[in-house]
Amino acid sequence: MSPSPISIPPSSPIADDTTDDNVLQPFFVLHKALPQKCQRKAAGSTRTRRKIDLPHSSPKSPEKSDAVASSVGPNDANHERLRLEAFNMTWSKIDTTIKEVLTRIHRNLFAEVHQWALESFLALKSGKPRHALEIQSPYPLLDNVICRQIPTAMILTKNAEFVDDMLTFQELGEHLKYKGCHIANLLSMDFCAKDGIAGCLRSLLRQLVVDAPDTADMSVLSSWYCEPENYDHPVIIVIDDMERCSGAILADFIRLLSEWVNKLPVIFIMGVATTDTAKKLLPSDALQHLQASKFTLGSPLERMNALVEAVLVKPSFGFNIGHNVAVFMRNYFLGHDGTVISFVRALKLACVKHFSMEPLSFLGIDVCDENEVFLHGKCDALPDTLLKYAFNLPSCKRGKDCKNSRDDLGEGLSDLRKLLKAWSSVILCLCEVGKNNKIQLLDIFCEATDPALSSLDPSNHKLERLFNGQNLAEGRLDFKGGLIGQLVHTVRELPLSSLIELLDLWSIHTEELYEVHGEVRELQSVVKSSNSGNNLKERQIDCHKMSMSLCAGRTSLSVNGKAAALLDNMVRKFLMPIECLCFHEIICFRNVDILQSALIGNPRRNIQVDLMKSTTYIKCSCCSSNENVLSPTMHDTSVMYNLAQEHGDLINLQDWYQSFKSTVLSTNKLKSPLQHSPMSKKVKSSPSESEASIQARFCRAVIELQIAGLIRMPSKRRPDFVQRVAFGL
Amino acid sequence: MTVSAIKPKHEKEIEYLIKSYKDLYSKWLFELRCGFGLLMYGFGSKKILLEDFASTALTDYGVVVINGYLPSVNIKQVVITLAEVLSDQLKDKRKNSTGSKSRTQQPFRSQSIEDLLSFLNLQLPDDNDCFICVVIHDIDGPSLRDSESQQYLARIASCSLVRMVASVDHVNAPLLWDKKMVHTQFNWCWYHVPTFAPYKVEGSFFPLVLANCRNAQTTKTALVVLQSLTPNAQSVFKILAEYQLANEKEGMPINALYTKCRERFIVSNQVTLNSHLTEFKDHELVKVGRHADGQDCLHIPLPSEALGQLLQELG
């Protein structure tokens, strides 16, 4: 297949010889960037997003091939650029939020570690020499102390997977650097046996000393420390994953630094999975140089709850996920590896897919913007094709009151924003209840996004069924296992003090939801007055304590009932799942299949399926459409793999070859009288040649199966057998 | 009849199938620009597909192709080339933007891999759409399968100015990567793109199953064994190989080998030579046969071309 003529770099000599010579080169430059690109980019980058004019007619980019810049319409190059810019803005907002949330969670720990580092530094300083000359001398200082200890913070990570904590350690490093410490982040890779102690020393020097020589010399570090701007600050070495370091090298490193600790106030921060890690990894003579203190990180579920609240529930990014995607991501988080980082990656991929697939996704960033005029302006500038596309969205077709004008789109989008805000307020209120009940916010989110929950949907009144209205009025709820129902029930059972706290939080979350906010305030005042009344009475009449507390219990019951009714009311009125809203496609990603296939490639299954059902990809007229029948015209490797299914874990080469041969030949003979194909005549006329040809085809198919990792070559012990490796899909 | 001369089946359909992926090019480019790497899998060679994608959709970016199916790839050389391509790209950019100054620096060839990687990981404040692409055919191929290569590839992939487009063919390819590589470095977006195209080049390094197993000794395995031996042992092997290339039909008599080795101060006595020869025989690098005149002679079971290539790589 030759590249289209427009797209070949015009005068690149490198690109011309990419065919035969390059296949045996370990690597080669296919082409360099077109010089025009930079000019175009430079011109483009000076424009700010706010000034982008939406093109009514979209000129086709001359540099792009037809495949890249498709015809004028929703997918043309200009709109693609807008979507890319919108993605960058949206994701940078989400990313910043995620970082802020994670930092907030660890803020206390960071402060604790910093305090500890300062104290350790002071302790180290007390035994430190005072003359710079002494420090600069190219040998460690010895004193009377037999064993010099390095203060070490062992940070226990509550995670089975270390990958989640890498960011935490990075941030801890940044935090301490900001507080004036010298920081070096050493990776487990720096402590590998191959490079020896020089590897980690070089990495340490590289991070601390500007223009460090490529030698592992401690005296370089000590003279660096004597420079006035570096002096008198602790040197903190962060090793995020201690368990993956080579024990021997780490032990050498610790011994070496302990000799220098008098001159260089070194402090370790190490990430460990259990308290025994250091004992298992290090020999006792290295261990005795560590003066360990323990700290503990938060669990991934805690982080997850905070992330869901900040990223998924608050609609300030112009990107949301639908129910199916939310359920998939929850299962992915719980079932895959339980790391927040994998969840964030899945979210980012969903975001990319949304902006790459949804032509109008660039409007999302403005949907969540308060500036109505700008949103309307942007809708006004939309070309007709996109406008038509917008009104053809399934959600729009469902709402029948649109007149398909630009104003309608603007109105529709600002309605969407309002509804989303209300929806988000209610979920936040539910989440607050969930926190008391230790229910995961992601579960609540999944249930709240379920379109089947919508009372607007006349076909499914699941919500109505969840709460039986009559029962609620009587103070009893009819539960059918729904989380939201459980949460309302929780409110009914909350002790008064928790209810007061809850109402305070509700009042914050519903600030912009005026209808509800008034009721919350009212309820707050009722609860507070009853609470203070109870306290007074309890103080005054001690002897009637029992009866009074009963009375208080009754009051709180009625107040709890009111709060539950309020929550129920909120849910009914405002918890409209995003997928039931008009124009939700513009900001909501729902295609779970695309996300799943991009996130979790499944080569083991799919490559086998490719081979078993090759006819679904190679759409030819000659092969049988029936998957169970092997036709001689089918792809050779596919025939071979289908034949291999009949064997056990060992395949006799002779048997396999014979069955392959009979498949490609005997069926030919059967068919040849009917088809009179030239191929079969040729086979008959030169049988010896065809034997060689079949052998060659057999060999190639075996190689291809070997490349795919489906079989292993014959061993010396069994030269006539190949081994099947993959069984079942 | 050779494997390369097999008449291809369904050529048109396969071509059509590969062309049908052209519609995805704009999506692939979008995802690359968003910071993801692309990983193509599915049965069939994806060499044509990937290079077509790179030469049609990635014209705005420098592209370096790595053939992972080859027996050996030097990652350091790749990183140097990447740095050079990127440097050219940045120079072009600087020419077009005013007020920026060009930095003089030492040539990339003399820089350490850490410095090169940090150059590839520069943070450009104004433009997040300036990057180079690395296309890797068979990132799970024989030369890249070891953990060290994968670690380096992961570090290359995580550089801010590099995007990676790779293909895998092995069903167990994901086992090459740990969580850190998958989630934070490669950042793959998977695509199932079966092509059913023949693995012409990729398969050329595999021994044929029906061929005589004794010839299955490949240059690659011989090279690996030889590299693990001492320089003296390698020199003995070189003498033997040179003799075999000069006199194809007959093997080298042991006495002749001993004399040659002594002349070049490689061995000082017969015992040392025998120990080298035992090592060669154990690894099937050398076979012992009997000459017409009755004396034992040594023979390397490799065809001349393979032997020539082996000598070149050993040297």
Image (spheres, coloured by chain):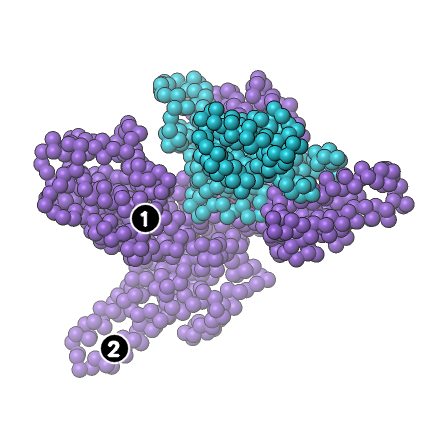
Quarter occupied by residue A679: top right
Residue B122 percent across, percent down from the top left: 38, 30
Is residue B48 depicted above or below A629 in this figure? above
Quarter of the picture containing the C terminus of chain A is bottom right
Residue B50 percent across, percent down from the top left: 59, 34
Q: Residues within 10 Å of mark 2 (few under 14, many from 20)?
A: some
Q: Which chain is purple?
A: A
Residue A531 visible at all? yes
Front one among A398 and A49: A49
Name the colour assigned to chain B in the rendering: cyan
Is the C-beta separation of discs 2 and 1 under 8 Å?
A: no
Q: Which residue is mark 1?
A: A247
Quarter occupied by residue B79: top left
Q: Label 2 to label 1, Cα distance in Å?
A: 62 Å
A727 displayed left or right of B83? right
Q: Which residue is mark 2?
A: A549
Q: Residues within 10 Å of mark 1 (few under 14, many from 20)?
A: many
The chain to which mark 1 is attached is A
The amino acid marked with disc number 1 is: Gly
